[in-house]
Image (spheres, rainbow, N blue to C red):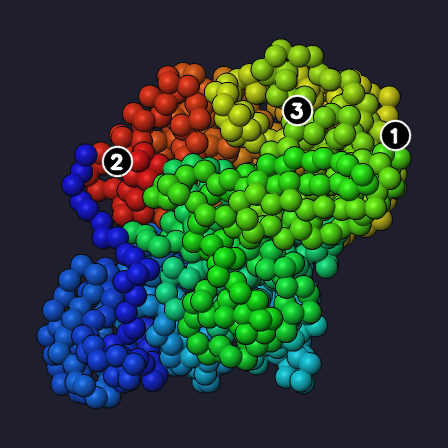
Amino acid sequence: MKDAVHQTFYLADYQPPAYLIEDVTLTFRLSPRATRVLSRIHFVPNPDTSDRTFFLHGEQLTLISAKIDGHEITPTLTDTGLTAEAPDAPFTWEAEVEISPETNTALEGLYMSNGMYCTQCEAEGFRKITYYPDRPDVMAPFSVRIEGEQPILLSNGNPTASGKGWAEWHDPWPKPAYLFALVAGDLRATTGSFTTRSGRDVTLNLWVRPGDEDKTAFGLQALIDSMKWDEDVYGREYDLDLFNIVAVSDFNMGAMENKGLNIFNSSAVLASPETATDANFERIEGIIAHEYFHNWTGNRITCRDWFQLCLKEGLTVFRDQQFTSDMRSASVKRISDVLMLRARQFREDAGPLAHPVRPEQFQEINNFYTATIYEKGAEVIGMLKRLVGDRDYYRALDVYFQRHDGHACTIEDWLQVFEDTTGRDLSQFKRWYSQAGTPLLHVEDSFEDGTYTLTFRQETRPTPGQPDKAPLVIPIAVGLLSPDGTEVVPTTLCEMSAATQSFTFDGLTEKPIPSILREFSAPVILTRQASNAERAFLLAHDTDPFNKWEAGRALAKDVLIHMITDGNAPDSAYLDALKAMVSDESLDPAFRALAIALPSQDDIAQTLHASGVVPDPMAIHNASKTLRQATAEHLADILPDLYAANQVHEAYQPNADQSGKRALAGAALSLIARLDGGKQAQAQYDAADNMTQQLSALSALLLADAGTDALAAFEAQWKDDRLVMDKWFSLQVMMAKPDDVADVVTRLTARPDFDMRNPNRFRAVIGALGGHLAGFHHPSGKGYELMADWLIKLDALNPQTTARMSSAFDTWKRFDEDRQQMIRAQLERIMARETLSRDTSEMVGRILA
Ligand code: ARG
Ligand code: ZN
């Protein structure tokens, strides 16, 4: 094993910066392999500390010159930055460095994508641009001059001057370096405008490469909707005259909230009906909102240090979820969010990568842009809102924005605002930020003399580094139904804080049926095994849409698990209940589409493992397939009508109403394909004029083993559209039979258009490999070996994306001895690499530990 030891950073070690910055001026002379960056920075001693160590971060920089107050100096250079003697008084720092954007394949700092220059600085990428205190608690106004031959030269804030080959920008709002951005390229704007409620006219530009102009309208409208929503709901206005969004093809994440210049992965912003699915449109709307909302929750109020990442991410995810609920269907949004939370965050929380919402240590902060910090972070805000109530929540937010505007804050600051405005003691609630692991919530009930009692017991299992867990505050929303189906107790909040706690409901005439954890009021695992009769009852009668869906899901899971563990045949009571629900036209089609979907195979593996059974991926695959076939047969007589009734006859709109219908018709189509060999799917494919229907038809055809022609036609039609071809790549892996997955991946990765430097393309294929339970965990071990091969190859180019994708292995301890040994061998092979990045070494090390 290699001996490079990477430094670990601890929350407990926080020290305020020795120097603060009054203002920064940067000049960029762009050149692919020899960009010059000139900096002029006014430093002042920080009055809050006596420390006068002058340290500037800097990585992969060639220092040309450095001056303090006009005098040339020779700083001491290290791998991570420089130190120098500095005055205990205000002074001016000037430096010139050289960097090479063209060879920067890590896509962090200043890099090139398809001939255009762009930046990604969060979290610690600015140090690859120039020497700087690259920490979020150092905030400053930036002036930027860009010299380059590209027609469009952009940076943060407002444009101040420009001429042929140069442009100057000024951002008056003090910001940390991670919010810096620069873009230079041949770009075309789609322009719009928004007038804020106090009358500021804001120009909105969505910049794309020539040829993509037809994919900008939706993103621009989503931006306008977001700006309006943040005014209406949070009272937050935009604060510059210009808001730029740029689409970039090569990007490690979804998007980035740089002040006034958001940079987006093209997959997170470009959309037209022909090229994007309904799901793509919804995701784009959510990400545009997310980045825009960061202007207040992230930019105006930022994080003191990176341990506080959830301060901006959890809150901003919560806000974008609220936005989507308002724009579309709240119950469908809640179900989708919980599906995602369980698939990604619960998985993370149950394995070797578990960490608190506010982690206390890291080696590479990029490894902590996780489902726990984002999604569980949002759940924690949702619980807080439920506990204090809507009115107090918005009152507290007003105080938060007022008190902390322009500051770099902590979770303590955030909770203090709630304590001050509501008078509540949140010390126990705060454990949600420090304690990792998903709590199990056990329930018992009893009924006596008209009183119904629910007794809850909470239990959080040990996670890495945290053997002992303390009780959390858990808001449990409960409703009670009488056996005739009427609701006798409407949704009531049980505030649990003890390890075991009872709640009583009296004045009842008969024992009610409980609907527990309505709206999924806390991110916990309810262990209660209701009878299937009770689940069928809730599926039919629960007034809470989330729990109605949940009852159906629990039924489906139970059926699948018994098929796997006891060799049962598909349960006809479940199939009857499903049929009744699917034909119930009073239910939203989108809801019905969600209810038809089976639990994911990974979800079943997770559930089996939690109940002490070693999951067999092949058995899970086969049971899912058998149940789908049985569903198709059981529903055969209603499928044609269901399909026909949910056709959309108006012009394509990516709205909730139409997309719900297309989702339900698509679900029906995939069942029909199991009965008719793909005839209906081929007809839909041939007639499709939008990507949602084209793709659902293609996937139904693949399911029926009848997709060869359509795959070729799709490729011929879309070979020049990278984003659409990503779908073509990933669908083939997703739909491959377990025995074929490795071959399909090998074939696809040998194609000249498999460009591993492009994270979207890499994820489309290798991400789909990791997501194919039975293919990845194939008994031959080929899936593991392929994954490791590709992670090793990519690590040399792009550590960030490699490290993220290494989490494909994080469930390895669920599986049998043979598989564990094969996985361990691959993980150790990765670890043994001489030049493994800090990113991947930290992740693989944690997975192995
Ligand atoms: N702040 C961005 C967002 O949530 C994510 C950027 C993270 N980038 C990274 N390299 N870690 O929208
Ligand atoms: Zn974010």
The percent coordinates of residue 142 (x first, y second) are 39, 79
Question: In the image, what residue type sits under mark 3?
Answer: Asp
Disc nearest the viewer among 2 and 1? 2
Do the CB atoms of the residues marked 2 and 1 lie less than 8 Å apart? no
- Residue 788 visible: yes
Residue located beneath label 3 in the image: 558
**Rounded to the nearest whole Å, what is the CA distance between mark 2 and mark 1?**
55 Å
For marks 3 and 1 on the same chain, the one whose residue lies earlier in the sequence: 3
Q: Is residue 18 left or right of residue 608?
A: left
| Residue 524 located left or right of residue 846 | right
The residue nearer to you, when weighing 49 against 72, is: 49
Q: Please name the residue shown 27% across and 47% down the image.
A: 838
**Can you say which quadrant of the picture contains the N terminus?**
top left
Q: Amino acid at mark 1?
A: Asp
Viewport quadrant of the C terminus? top left
**Against 125, is 592 above or below?**
above
Residue wearing tag 1: 641
Q: Which residue is mark 2?
A: 831
Total marks in image: 3
Earlier in the chain: of badge 3 and badge 2, it is 3
Q: Amino acid at mark 2?
A: Met
> What percent of the width, then of the height, locates residue 348?
46, 40
> Helix, strand or loop at disc 1?
helix
